[in-house]
Image (cartoon, rainbow, N blue to C red):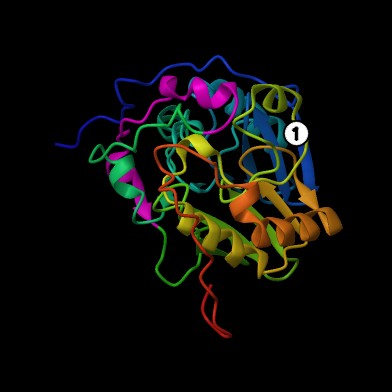
Amino acid sequence: MEKELSYGSDYKFIPATSIGSGVGISVSPDIYCYTIQIVNIIFVGDPNTNEFVLVDAGMPHSSDEIIRVTEERYGAGAAPKAIILTHGHFDHVGAIVELVQNWEVPVYAHELEIPFLTDKKSYPEPDPTVEGGLVAKMSPLFPTQPINLGNHVAALPADGSIPDMPGFRWIHTPGHSVGHVSFFRDSDRMLIAGDAFITVRQDALFKVMTQEQELNGPPRYLTTDWQEAWNSVRKLEALKPAAAVTGHGLPMSGEALSNGLSRLTKEFDKLAIPDYGKYVDGQLPKPAKIKKGEKQ
């Protein structure tokens, strides 16, 4: 008998917010970014149809808000075809149990994230000693124990396609988590980056609250492999995205995005990697070269 869907025993409301909380932004006719406290969820799909998916699942205890926003955009009783996860950290799966129970829809994630979503494995502990601000210091409060979605979660297809997201492909972008993925649409160069890079200084409480826009590497307190993180940013920069929606911060496009990503890629060791912390080994990693024609 399958175990009932559940969160870990450390699941709880996290008292953090920003001026962007409750605000939605139409990035394109079929891409809508909505902020819940300090994290973004993304709806992918034309609001004139019921063909849409939800990317990521917000903060703990946000299911009622997500359902309300879904129905405001797509109509009463609307439900996505699926929930697609960039990764399984607490702020990206905070409402997923209630959403799956309410909507009865499948969840997809990279195969390396599945153990964290099926009660098999806990995430590494956040690092409050890492160089950064008050959010980093409060990171021991953040849940890390696995949730259990049972057979409601499945691995993304090995061919790079994404169920119910036609035109998009998934790209493995580890570093922040082992199975982190980003989503890219070649036709308009739209990127959903997750936390591979973000557009706010996520470890600094003031910048999180004010949502001051600046392109950064992944959140420091939960990133455990900086070599992989650097390689992932380099991989995404090589795609030359026209617009990007990230897990934290405002969407970014045009020259601000291209210039910011170029600088981040070249100076990742200075801009993103902390000077100290338990996941920093003291030797700055170097970005691996991507060979011409290499699959992203």
Residue 171 magenta = no
Q: Residue at x 31, y 27 (%)?
A: 6
Q: Residue at x 83, y 53 (%)?
A: 256
Crowd class of label 1 (few under 14; some 14 to 19; many from 20; radius 10 Å): some
In this picture, which residue range is highlighted in magenta? 131-155
Q: Closer to the camera, 183 or 197?
A: 197
The single residue placed furthest to the left in the displayed view is: 1
Q: Does residue 2 appear anywhere in the picture?
A: yes
- Amino acid type of the residue that numbered disc 1 sits on in the rendered structure: Gly
Q: Residue at x 59, y 53 (%)?
A: 269
Residue holding disc 1: 24
* Quarter of the rendering occupied by the N terminus: top left
Q: Which quadrant of the figure has residue 79?
A: top right
Give the tally of numbered discs.
Answer: 1
Q: Closer to the camera, 242 or 177?
A: 177
Q: Closer to the camera, 161 or 190?
A: 190
